Amino acid sequence: MRDRQGIDPDLVIREGEAVAEILAQIEADRDIGVLVLGAGEAREGPGPLVTQLTRASGALPIPITIVPGGLSKEEIEAIT
């Protein structure tokens, strides 16, 4: 973001249950325009965070983008 868009991202640290804190941060910060999640590569599924947040996606005020865990930096840059 810094190199391509000239935007300095904020570092936010919150304590608590991950999904609840992510949802609270989205609600508190109206500058957040999209939630990007990295999916795990395990056979069990994309991971608990992705699973729980996609269940709540219909009620979110922003879209969710899920990035497959096996993509390289170059592959991610090519599709963005």
Image (spheres, grey):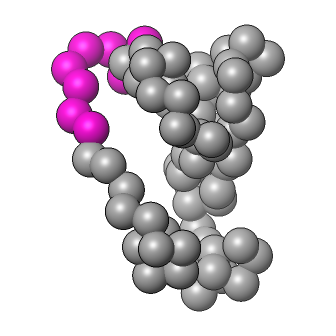
Across and down, in percent, residue 61 comes to 69, 22
Is 14 part of what is drawn in magenta? yes
Q: Residue at x 65, y 59 (%)?
A: 68
Q: Is residue 13 above or below residue 1?
A: above
15 displayed left or right of 26:
left
* Residue 61 visible in image: yes
Across and down, in percent, residue 67 comes to 64, 56
Of 79 and 51, nearer the camera is: 79
| Range of residues picked out in magenta | 12-20
* Residue 23 visible in image: no
Q: Residue at x 52, y 38 (%)?
A: 31
Across and down, in percent, residue 32 comes to 54, 38
Q: Residue at x 63, y 42 (%)?
A: 34
Of 46 and 72, nearer the camera is: 72
The quarter of the image holding the C terminus is: bottom right
Magenta span: helix, strand or loop, mainly?
loop
63 displayed left or right of 68:
right
Across and down, in percent, residue 72 comes to 55, 79
Is 17 part of what is drawn in magenta? yes
Q: Is residue 11 above or below residue 77?
A: above
Q: Residue at x 36, y 62 (%)?
A: 8
66 displayed left or right of 47:
right
Of 41 and 7, nearer the camera is: 7
Q: Tell how many labels.
A: 0
- Where, by quadrant of the figure, is residue 59 drawn? top right
